[in-house]
Image: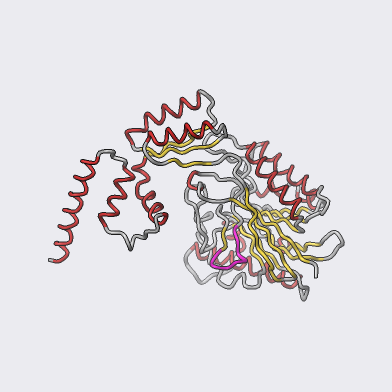
Amino acid sequence: MRKLKVLHTADWHLGRNLKDIQRESEFIDVLNQLYQYLEREQPDLILLAGDIFDSSLPSIWAQRLYYDFCSRVSRLAFTPAVVITGGNHDSALLLDAPQQLLSSFNIYVIGGSYLDINKEVIPVDNQEGERIAIVLAVPYLRDSQLKRARRASEVESWSEQLHDAMRLHYQEVIAQGLALRGDANIPLIAMGHLFMQGGVINEHDGTRPPVGTLGAFAADTTFDAIDYLALGHLHQPQMVGGREHWRYSGSLLKSAFSETGHEKSLTLISFEGKKIETIELLPLQSPIPLIRLTGTFEEQELAIARLEKESTNVYVEMQVSERFLTPASMFQSHLKEKSSPVMILQLTRLQKMAALDIMNHLPQKGISLAQITPIELFKERLLVAQLEDSALEHKLEKLFLQLEKELLEQERE
């Protein structure tokens, strides 16, 4: 039995800037990595699950990169099929406009949902005309489309009605896909661009938990008949709800300093018949690294000096206490004026991030909130504040212990 290879990607967000930095060259770099993987792995099918663009009115260079992708893929010697669906950032009309032209090159685009769900059921054949998969190309389901499509529902909540309409849409598409597949030993693959219950978000990368007014979608048994669920919308590669075959492939580029510890990748799935044999993450290298600096202002200055010696472009966030914001801003301007390869794009006042930083920092030390005492937690807060005055820190610790003692005594009374 011939094995089937599927490459799953999503959330390209072509055209997105980082602060005021245009990232065209970075997108070109990471797409070149994608092309190298295509040549090496030679997948039979490529899935692009939404948010191709960052805006419904993408820049000319963003559109050029998209059509360059379509052109390059269509010229590959191993002739993969490509299925592209629209996301919440995309214009369905813009994606669908060249639909007929692209389909002649084995590239199938579903920018927006149709009342005729048969259009979302795509039989995929190889070059020899042999059927190799059924793809359910469900794009981002907009609230207005779900309003038109929903049936009478017993639930009163508008959000629940929309969830019911979404579930019904998938159930009908899946039923059509199962009927089309029949007894063939080929995978039934569903695509979606939504926030699935159990997915992990990064709240600073531009991804919001609810898409439109929907919130997290609980699939229940909706996707039980699906052999692989190719998801888009969340930017961190992950499986969902402990199911290995329900996956977000994640975005191509890091779009926020909160992603500095994350790795980007493409997802490669190998099937033998309907059965998944392997799932592999193909790592993507950041063309320009994002670095988040911590420590005293002087320590961060030294770290930047070391980075400058490497003569490699980097994007930097400095986290400084309020009294160092002005010196840090002057330092940022100085580096920009001399065209340093180190670009400080973000200055973050530590007091604003104190609670978040502590919550992120404790697990890195192997400590949970259940294990730490109140005074230890307070000391962590003082570290974040960078008071640089040991006498003041000692005085504050004494005051905290006194307050803690008084509160405990009140509880006993």
Question: What residue appears at the point 64 percent right and 69 percent down from the top-left corner?
Answer: 171
**Residue at the outermost left position:** 413
| Residue 87 vs residue 82, the one in the foreground | 82
Residue 132 at what x, y percent from top left?
78, 65
Q: In which quadrant will I find the N terminus?
A: bottom right
- Residue 82's place in the image compared with 185, above or below, is above
Percent across and percent down for residue 269 are 68, 62
Left or right of 29 in this view: 183: right
Q: Position of residue 283 (x, y in %)?
A: 63, 52
Q: Is residue 349 magenta?
A: no
Given residues 28 and 117, the one toward you in this image is 28
Residue 246 included in the magenta stretch of the image: yes
Instruction: Report the magenta stretch's main SS.
Output: strand
Vertical placement of residue 63 versus 191, above or below: above
At 41% from the left and 26% from the top, the residue drawn is: 330
Measured from the top left, where is residue 62 in percent x and y? 66, 40
